[in-house]
Image (cartoon, grey):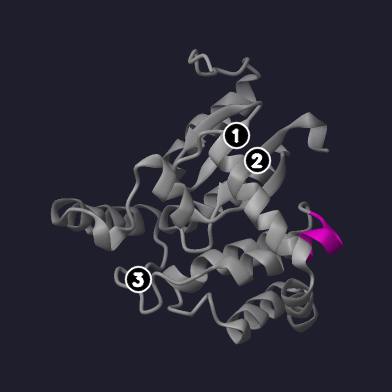
Amino acid sequence: MAGGRVIEFYFSFVSLWSYIGSRRFQQLVQKTNSHVIFKPVDLMHIFSISGGLPVKQRATQRQAYRIIEMERWRKIHDIPLVLYPKYYPADPSLAHRVLLAAIDEIGHDSSLVQDFVHKGLEAVWARELDIASPEIIVQLADEAGPEGSRLLKRAQSEAHFAQAEESLTKEAESRKVFGAPFYFYQDEPLWGQDRLEMLEDIIQSGRGPIRSSETE
């Protein structure tokens, strides 16, 4: 398990900021020789219990500033990014379950799984694809390598994958996750793709984790 370096990664395929940080996160994982545990969650539920709002329900000032930030990050990292994607928001649950089926078969560390995660993230934000569409999900899985049609059948017919997504969402809630991407390293939480440099520093320095002093 990559020398004990384990990063837990809570995200959703409709998460803008998870997409923006996706390739850099993959590079960090390779550079630090870390092991990632992918944890797709119901982001709308996480918003609903943590004070967050879906984009279209936010104040107009916040929506306007978000677009400016998107432009900035697009230029900084030279990545394709659609400011007003055609299929957003969309329900990513089926795609999450297909990912969990792929993990069940070939594991978190498989390069095919890692590529599928990135393709799932870029679907909405770079390619304007409908991540809720079974056909699109199969296409993305096939592009990454896993056999999409077989994984789709498993995701649709085996109830434990839906249960697994629900369990991961409850787990995220219990760990006080309130957005995506959310990373945990040695139980230290980091929220947002702009914390990736901090995450790398924590791993490389070998320092002990900083945890909340809040008592239950």
Q: Is residue 200 magenta?
A: no
Q: Which residue sits at x=62%, y=86%?
A: 135
Q: Which residue is mark 2?
A: 8
Q: Which residue sits at x=48%, y=80%?
A: 129
Q: Which residues are magenta?
A: 101-107
* Element class at badge 3: loop
**Label 2 crowd (10 A; few <14 / some 14-19 / many >=20):** some
Give amino acid for label 1: Phe
Q: Which residue is mark 1?
A: 184
* Element class at badge 2: strand
Q: Is residue 76 above or below residue 135?
A: above
Quadrant into which the C terminus falls: top right
Q: Which residue sits at x=40%, y=77%?
A: 87
Residue 186 in the image: state x and y as whole percent: 66, 26
Q: Is residue 104 magenta?
A: yes
Please tell me which of labels 2 and 1 falls first in the chain.
Answer: 2
Q: Which residue sits at x=40%, y=54%?
A: 77
Q: Which residue is mark 3?
A: 82
| Along the viewing direction, whichever of 84 and 213 lies nearer the viewer | 213
* Residue 28 visible in the current orientation: no
Give amino acid for label 2: Glu
* Element class at badge 1: strand
Residue 29 in the image: state x and y as whole percent: 66, 43
Q: Is residue 98 left or right of residue 84?
A: right
Badge 2 vs badge 1, beta-carbon distance below 8 Å = yes
Q: Quadrant of residue 7?
A: top right
Please tell me which of labels 2 and 3 falls first in the chain.
Answer: 2
Q: Main secondary structure of the magenta part?
A: helix
Quadrant into which the N terminus falls: top right
